Image: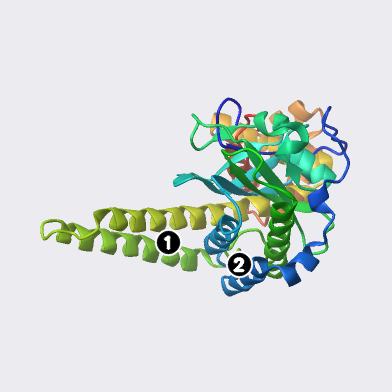
Amino acid sequence: MVTASVKVLSEPTPRTVVVPGLPLRKTAGSTQKPEEALLRNPTVAAAARELAHHRGQQFEQHDVLLAAMRRVTTVDAFYVAEFVGDDSIHYHHQYDGDVFDLPGSHSVRPGGMAAWVRHHRRTYQYGTDNGRLLNAGISFGKLDKRSRDALVAPVFDGGRASVIGLVSIQTYRPNCYDTTVVATFESLIEAFAAQLAHEHALTGTNEDQSEESFISHVLAAIGAVHSDATRDLRQVGKGLRDPEAALRKVKRQLERLLSDLWARELGEHRRVAAWLDMLTPRQRELALLMGHHLGRNGQVPSNDVLAAEMNVASSTIKTYINAALRVFDAQDKHGVAAAVWRLLETRDHRES
């Protein structure tokens, strides 16, 4: 929401992030332990059961969060995002009213929303700084409207050692999210995180799922959309009773398919980011260099050229490449470069 948008995106954190003018005190809404509210709040308890029922189904779990919050307050915009590495954040569920924004990635900007939330490990509230931090982000959804209240909560890993993602609710109406709403929201995110810990991922797609199995899943989903569209088209001439409802159904089917495809792609991104982290700094530098060369020039240079660019001997480059081949389980350096480039090309280098 840079100019006039409902929602604002975020970014991973540097080690010391302090946003000038934003108090570091804990807010009233964040003093309650989420598990205490979980036991007392029927909305949260019901949502926790639904989340468990949809275990492994990312799209449905996100819908559960949104529906639960809409039962207790006004929610005009909503997003779920996941950190990948230290410099990228991926948004795979974004709604502004009935507008579904396509999944996408952004680079992390030091001092931005996601950096602040991940560093301070607590929920951002619009009223803390009158939306200044929120408004510094990138807009999405309905760009002719501006959020007047918002919460951006951290999603913790199973041991609460680190923030692995964000969930945000936003509204056009001012002063909607009081301490009760904040406590309910944080409790819902706690229940959501518990399910994620069980699944060992922030996406509902099984990363160990074979390529053939996933392709079968996608083909089946496309087939279902095609079947519904074909049936509805046949009914048009006979007086389709509710064409708007039919279109909404197809729209939701496509949104889920997009979400599933993005989750699969995100799993690949996570693996490549993890592999890069397993390399030494110089080995990682070489892997990134090869990825950039492949993306920009369509080929990976010879070892001598790479050695000259990194100011090391060709034999050293060969040693680095062999290390990368083992980590990436690749046949040659082109395989490493291709995996790295797929990660790099999806990153949106706009500051969010």
Residue 26: horizontal and vertical position, in percent? 86, 46
Crowd class of label 2 (few under 14; some 14 to 19; many from 20; radius 10 Å): few
Q: Quadrant of residue 148?
A: top right
Q: Quadrant of the C terminus?
A: top right
Query: What numbered label is drawn on residue 208?
Result: 2
Q: Give the labeled residue for mark 1.
A: 218
Q: Is residue 92 left or right of residue 97?
A: right
Numbered disc 2: secondary structure:
loop
Q: In percent of the image, x 58 and y 47: which residue is there?
A: 78
Q: Quadrant of the N terminus?
A: top right
- Amino acid under label 1? Val
Q: Nearer the viewer, residue 339 or 92?
A: 92
Q: Quadrant of residue 305?
A: top right
- Amino acid under label 2? Asp
* Disc 1 + disc 2, Cβ < 8 Å: no
Q: Is residue 169 left or right of residue 219?
A: right
Q: Nearer the viewer, residue 48 or 232?
A: 48
Disc nearest the viewer among 1 and 2 = 1
Q: Is residue 247 left or right of residue 82?
A: left
